[in-house]
Amino acid sequence: MSLLLMAPALLLLLAVFFWPMLDYAWLSLQAQTVFTGLKPVPVGLANWERLLGDGRFWQDAAQTLRFAVVSVGLELLLGLAIALLLHQSWRGRGLVRSLSLLPWALPTTVMALGWRWILNDPNGPINGVMQSLGLPSLPFLASTQLAWLGVVLADTWKTTPFVALLLLAGLQMIPTDLYEAFALEGGRPWQGLRRITLPLLRPYVLIALIFRLAQALGVFDLVAVLTGGGPASSTETLALYAYLNAMRFLDFGYSATVMLGMFVLLLASALLLVLAQQRWQGARP
Amino acid sequence: MSSSPLRQRPALLRISMVALLLLWSLAPMLWQLYTSLRTPESLLAGLAGLGGGWTLANYSAVLQADPPFGVYLLNSTVVGALSTLLTLALAIPCAYALSRRSDLLKLVIGGGLLAAAVFPYVLLFLALLQVARQLGLANNLLALCLPYAGLSLPLAVLLLQAAFADLPVELEENALLEGFSLGQRLRWILLPLIGPAVVSTGLLVFLFSWNEFPIALTWLSRSELLTLAPAMARIAGSSVFTVPHGAFAAATVLGGVPLLALLLIFQRQIVAGLTQGAIKG
Amino acid sequence: MINTIASGAGPTGDLRLEALNRRIAGRQILAGIDLAVAPGECLALLGPSGCGKSTILRLIAGLDRPDGGRILLAGRDITALPPGRRQVAMVFQSYALYPHLSVERNLLLGMELRGVPRQQRQQEADRVLSMLQLESFRSRRPSELSGGQRQRVALARALLRRPQVFLLDEPMSNLDAQLREELRPQLRAILCGGEAPVIYVTHDQQEAMGIADRIAVLQNGRLQQCGTPQELYTNPANVVVASFIGRPQINLLDRGDGSLLGIRPEHLQAVEDGGVAVRVLSREWHGASQQLTVASPHGDLRWTTSGAEPINDQLRLGWQLQHELRFDLATGLRC
């Protein structure tokens, strides 16, 4: 009976999450392009061989990783600062907390359009401020060196509130007695942060890390609208590359291969993270 | 003087931090608002032309475009509402059943749900697109609810399962003894008691479907069917305007206002939902 | 003063438990329990935590399934019936009142879902509300009630069902001592003596002695003895029962011949000569009585005597032979 209650949900879940992986596994062994009349033709491991030697794939992988690490790192730092600020009780805290969630609530593509203008050279406000300070304006989105920073900025802006809220939840779980006892023994606030807060926040930091890292490695929406992957593919991410292969190059077999490759890289990162976490837990007393 | 300078300093520090936080959170959107009300010439003139150059033309351009902007908001609302209902309809029984178990199956399913919740779903777009094409589900707003519900289920089931588990067992046991059927127990006892969790979960699902991009992008091609997210992308790629930034900004504001309203109205529930997710995770 | 008796409707009969077994996670929670409770009889299940008494209650209610044995109600085998079909009402330790409903709705909901007509529902609810003096609370939520009031609502809800068995799981444990003493006779008056058997779980032997017609003492899933309070007090079947019944606990002295001598603190008397020489170690004076701990050649003894009795540091204690209880050292059984 209990299984009957769970069945519809589980079936939909299997259809949406599990079946695509099987489909991709099969598709990656086919060639389905304009040249095959958009019909799948078995080609063995050709797609996979191509993947291993595909410079663009590995370049994108590196770019995606760089973006994810920097973005998530910034989010954790900023998120922690915000969480600490919101943890104290002061008047208007609830409203400020909700307002600070606005970036997260806005659809990515909606704000991405806005960021194009904000980062615009030379008329956007950021460059406006820089010019009034006597600094040269920077071509954020037009420069192959700087464009990825624009993406990091936009992504950090959007998802920091989420991280902050997660860490805030963790802060609220720490009993205040611990701080009081610590203060009685002569501990200073900054030490309290290091000795009590951070260790007890660790599980929440980990959750935030895992969640955000997985999402950041699959970033698509932001890049598609903000830069389109440009200039010159400097902000192209793996997800975008997979999308282009399917929707623009109409190379479905290869697109599936790229996505499976992404999946493998994701699993590998997750494994590394788990191992790193074990070492970290084990090393400290 | 009631407080010493030493005590005033932390307060001052805090106020400036809060101001910084608000600036950081709201400035981009406020800038869009400003931009949307400016004529194209004044935008290019920078801060020099602040006196004049205000206009509502950008809004009328966007609202009267083909199709009018309101259509996108309507589509997103419809898809959002239906997805939320479908997700809850599937998640509630599943979460209930899961919360009453304590065997290996529960661990396996729980672990699977957690993995699915973390998974970057954009990877699924191709397979789902193929399904859509084969089953003729493309360009169908109702059909879009199916993948949306599927993608929202992991988080929904986990949140609701925790909510069910938090209820004292004896409440349901007494209801059992009184002879209530499962439907009666859910309707009169269990669901009312986890009401806040249902609302929070529903809001998170609703927000997700407004935000969702890759699947809507690939499933919908007819412009009058687009939801907000792909519509913005299409606007971003359009070259109708010579200096598009004003119109883009107007679109951004129009796209953002409904969600800002939702956020402010339901702030408690949304925050509660996210916080619960964190704690149970 | 509450003095109406719960009346059952329809045929009620006795409750029989035959050879009940229950095993959870490798541990034998219940081993071969046999009990019979007559209609209107109040049986207390008494024992320390983990003895299986709550499990028995849950098995009767149908919230748990036995691994072996049968449960018979009025001659009907209900062992396989789902809880909703057994016509059993239970008052939980936490009372399990629906927190989002008013007191009145808590009472009405069950009848409404069973299809009882509206007028009759209201009549019944009003009847029990007045019986338990809850009328002024009918619109309140459980969170606005005191512990004692909540207990009465839970009782009211159970009474409305006119069940074939009443089950109560430590219903007084959340109340303070004074309230417990006040409510004991009231509870007994409402429930016992009606037409349905009543099973009352408690770990408090005073409560059991005060409320029940018979007491079943349990330990480690086994029934130690079942009988009236007097029987258990004067004729305990083994050491477990003797130790559990009677406050303070019975004194057990090793005779050295493979048997134990049990003598209750209240049966010790100060004597001029004979008996045992003892030295007072501690003394608690409680007005009408006083409890002392004394050191003797056989070990420390507990002694209860009248509050008016003068106590010297050193004295002699004796007892009447008829109050002696002998137990086998190895098996604990009475010999």
Image: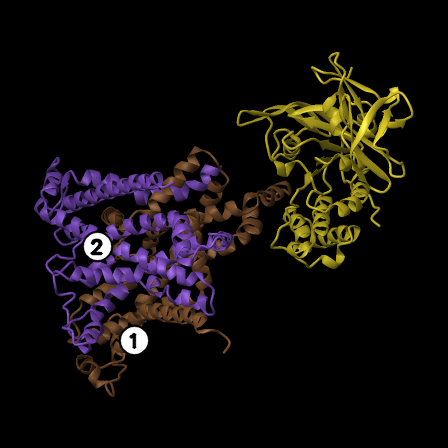
| Amino acid residing under circle 2 | Phe
* Depth order, front residue of A196/B239: A196
Q: Position of residue B42 (x, y in %)?
A: 20, 82
Q: Quadrant of residue B202?
A: bottom left
Which of the chains bears the disc numbered 2? A
Instruction: Inspect this view and state whether residue B176 appears.
Output: yes
Q: Position of residue A211 (x, y in %)?
A: 32, 50
Q: Position of residue B134 (x, y in %)?
A: 24, 47
**Residue B54: quarter of image:** bottom left
Quarter of the image where the C terminus of chain A is located:
top left
**Chain designation of label 1:** B
Residue C128, placed above or below residue B223: above
Which residue is farthest left?
A35
Residue B129 higher or lower than B98, as above or below? below
Q: Output the letter for the chain in purple.
A: A
Residue denoted by label 2: A67
Mark 2 residue element: helix
| Left or right: residue B46 compared with residue B9 | left
Give the residue number, with chain letter if any, for mark 1.
B33
Coloring scheme of the render?
by chain
Chain B drawn colour: brown
Of the residues shown, which amino acid type is indicated by label 1? Leu
Which chain is depicted yellow? C
Q: What residue is at 27 percent from the left and 39 percent from the top?
A: A271
Q: Residue at x 53, y 27 (%)?
A: C25
